[in-house]
Amino acid sequence: MSEIEPREIEWLWYPFIPYGKVTLLQGDPDDGKSTFMLTIAALLTRGEPLPFTDTGKPHEPISVIYQTTEDDADDTIVPRFIKANGDRERLLFISEKESPLSSYIGDCQINAANEVRPRFNYLIRIAKETGCAIVIIKHLLYHGYDETRAMFWADGDTGCSSQYWGRSIGWYACALVDTLDYIDDEKIRKELIQMAGDLALGLKEVQHPQSGLWYQVLDRYSEYGNYPEYSCSCMFVYFLRKAVRRGYLGSEYAKVAKKTYYGIIREFLEVDEKGRLNLKGTVYVSGLGGDRYRDGSYEYYISEPKQINNLLGIGAFLMASAEMEA
């Protein structure tokens, strides 16, 4: 280490975004991640000081490249940038048909850590060699979506519901990994495997760190009233184990599934006074629309009752167990 010359980190925005490095910005739906970054970009293009900085001094205007697969330039990116008074001459917008991250790190399984780490170094090297600051905005999956924005539970701007209901995403996960059994087209398979990888990353981040279980509202396990939910935990074990077995995910996700499976056995299985095995902790039902009480709020989801030996939970447990034994 004696030959390494120490140097100070240079900051685009101290202490949040350094020059020459990659920064990850992540949050829940509708937290305003994209709007936030476009506001920061607008300040940079005008050379104005950024929030929470000590000096408050202006700087030279900076050009910004904004790349996305989610939002369109004409109805989302540019209007938000204009609202923040950004200099449009200094904003370059790139729209990608596939994940921007995938287009930079090359042809590899983004869901496999052993493949991503060396490829991700390319992106890190770009930041280091050019001295630019790269910010990756990571989004989680939404539960429901209404294209018309007409449903009372849908956000007026995005059309998305506000919460992540565990079992709904569990159905999606199971369908995703099972659909791959019947798809031969390599382009479609690549897209589906990419989707599986994105989902697996999101699930890993909202898994309860101690129990290994997933909760009724996935990303709010520490909040009052939320609870570990049996059926979705089983579904995610099935999804992860099968995806690893089929080679869609890296082997590290087998450990994630194993932790959950042991948590399921510990927390949800019980023997009653007659010696019968019961499976507890499955939410009876949840949904969006119909009766007005199904408004998609956090309070709604945690109000739905749980059942013992609900068939939705039993079926998911059998699927998860079969994959654990495969």
Image: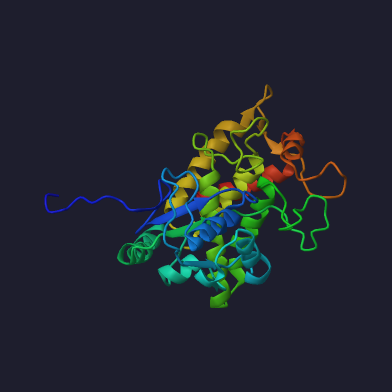
Residue 316 appears in the figure: yes
Give coordinates of residue 3: x percent, y percent: 12, 54
Q: At 52% across and 57% down in the image, what residue appears?
A: 43
> Please, is residue 250 above or below residue 310 in the view?
below
In the displayed orientation, state which residue is furthest to the right: 291
Q: Is residue 151 left or right of residue 197?
A: right
Residue in the foreground of this view, choosing between 41 and 72: 41
In the displayed orientation, state which residue is furthest to the front: 57
> Please, is residue 107 above or below residue 197 in the view?
below
Marker count (numbered): 0
Give coordinates of residue 307: x percent, y percent: 74, 35
Give coordinates of residue 96: x percent, y percent: 55, 72
Give coordinates of residue 22: x percent, y percent: 40, 57
Residue 139 appears in the figure: no
In the displayed orientation, state which residue is furthest to the top: 273
> Please, is residue 57 above or below residue 78 in the view?
above
Q: At 77% across and 43% down in the image, what residue appears?
A: 285
Q: At 54% across and 56% down in the image, what residue appears?
A: 37
Residue in the foreground of this view, choosing between 14 and 280: 14
Residue in the foreground of this view, choosing between 319 and 153: 153
Residue in the foreground of this view, choosing between 222 and 268: 222
